[in-house]
Image (cartoon, helix red, strand yellow):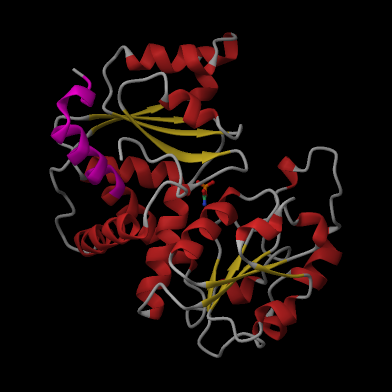
Amino acid sequence: QRHLLGIEPLRPEEITTILDLADRYVALGRSRDKHAQSLAGLTQINMFFENSTRTQASFELAGKRLGADVMNMAMQASSIKKGETLIDTALTLNAMHPDLLVVRHPQSGAVDLLAQKVNCAVINAGDGRHEHPTQALLDALTIRRAKGRLHRLTIAICGDVAHSRVARSNLLLLHKMENRIRLVGPATLMPAGIDDFGAEVYDDMREGLRDADVVMMLRLQKERMDGGFIPSEREYYHRYGLDADKLSHAKDDAIVMHPGPMNRGVEIDGTIADDINRSVIQDQVEMGVAVRMAAMDLLARNLRANPKTLSA
Ligand code: CP
C-alpha cells in the first residue's frame, strides 16, 4: 500500500505483517539502544488539526527512533488561522519534499482527500468519525500479546460507538480477523446502519459483557454531539460506566482496554483503569509506538521499492 488511510482496504495477511514487525519494535523499544535506521534520510511531517497526546507523541518518537527527520507542524500557529485551506497547506508542505505526512483532522474524509493531492505517503492519524487505523492496529497487537491470538475472541466495544473512529477501525479489523464483536451502549450512541457491521448490539452492559474476553471502553465524545442528545454523566456512568460489578460478567481473565483520553468516573471507574491485573491501557500506549514504527517502516520500504513515489 502507498498510504495507510484506513483498515478497510487492508487484507488480514497485511494486518498480520504489520503486527509481526511491530512485535520486533516492541523488543527494540525495551532495549537500551532504541534506534534503527529504516527511515534514515526520509522526512516525516506531522500535521495535527485536532488535539492529541498519545498519537502525536508516539508518531514523533517512532519517526525519531527510525532515523527520520521529523517535523511537527504547529497547526494552531499556522496560516490555516489566516484562512489557508487544508489542500493549499498540504500542497505547500508537499513542495518541501516530505516522504511521509501524518495527518489528523476533525472532518471525516479529509485525510483521503489530502492524500490525492500530494506525492508522498500519507498516514491517517484519525479523521472525524471515520477511521483511526493505527489505533486499531495497536489495539490488535495489545490483544494478540495478552490473549496469545487475534481470532475467535469475544470482544465487547462499549459506549459512544456512534462518534468513535476508534470503534469503526476496530470493528473493521476485528471482523476481518474473525472475532465475535459486540457493540454495547445506548441506542442513541449507536451509528445508523449498525447492522451492516456484522456485530451483535446490546443496550445492557451486563448482557453485553457476559463471557467476553476483551472489554474495550470508549470515551463519551461530547465535542462531536453537535446539538444531539447528550446523556448526563451521572446517569451514563450508572448504566454504562465500567465498574467491578459490570466487569464481573466478563470472563475472569478478560482484559480491559481504553484508547484514551479517559474520563474516569464517566465511562470507566478509576480503580479498574489502574488495576494492573485487568487493565492493559498502558500496554496500548507502548504498542502505539511499535505499531507506528512498523507502519512507517513498511511504507518506507514501499517508497524505496517504487522510487517514482519517493519525493525527490
Ligand atoms: N487514542 C488517541 O488517539 O489518543 P490521542 O487523542 O491522545 O492521540
Q: Is residue 284 left or right of residue 1?
A: right
Above or below residue 125? Residue 255 is below
34 with respect to 52 (left or right): left
Residue drawn at point x = 20 percent, y = 25 percent: 310
Q: Is residue 237 visible?
A: yes
**Foreground of the two, 65 or 210:** 210
Identify the residue at image location x=30%, y=47%: 295
Q: Magenta segment: does it hold 302?
A: yes
Q: Residue furthest bottom?
A: 252
Quadrant of the frame with the N terminus? top left
Q: Position of residue 151 (x, y in %)?
A: 42, 74
Closer to the camera, 16 or 138? 16
**Residue 148 among magenta residues:** no
| Magenta-colored span | 295-311
Q: Nearer the viewer, residue 233 or 120?
A: 120
Magenta stretch: dominant secondary structure: helix
Task: Tell me where residue 222 appears, x and y as whole percent.
Answer: 75, 46
Q: Would residue 261 be seen by someone viewing this image from the given angle?
A: no
Position of residue 139 measured from the top left corner of the image (x, y, whole percent): 45, 62
What is the quadrant of residue 262 in the picture? bottom right
Q: Position of residue 92 (x, y in %)?
A: 39, 11
Q: Is residue 135 above or below residue 257?
A: above
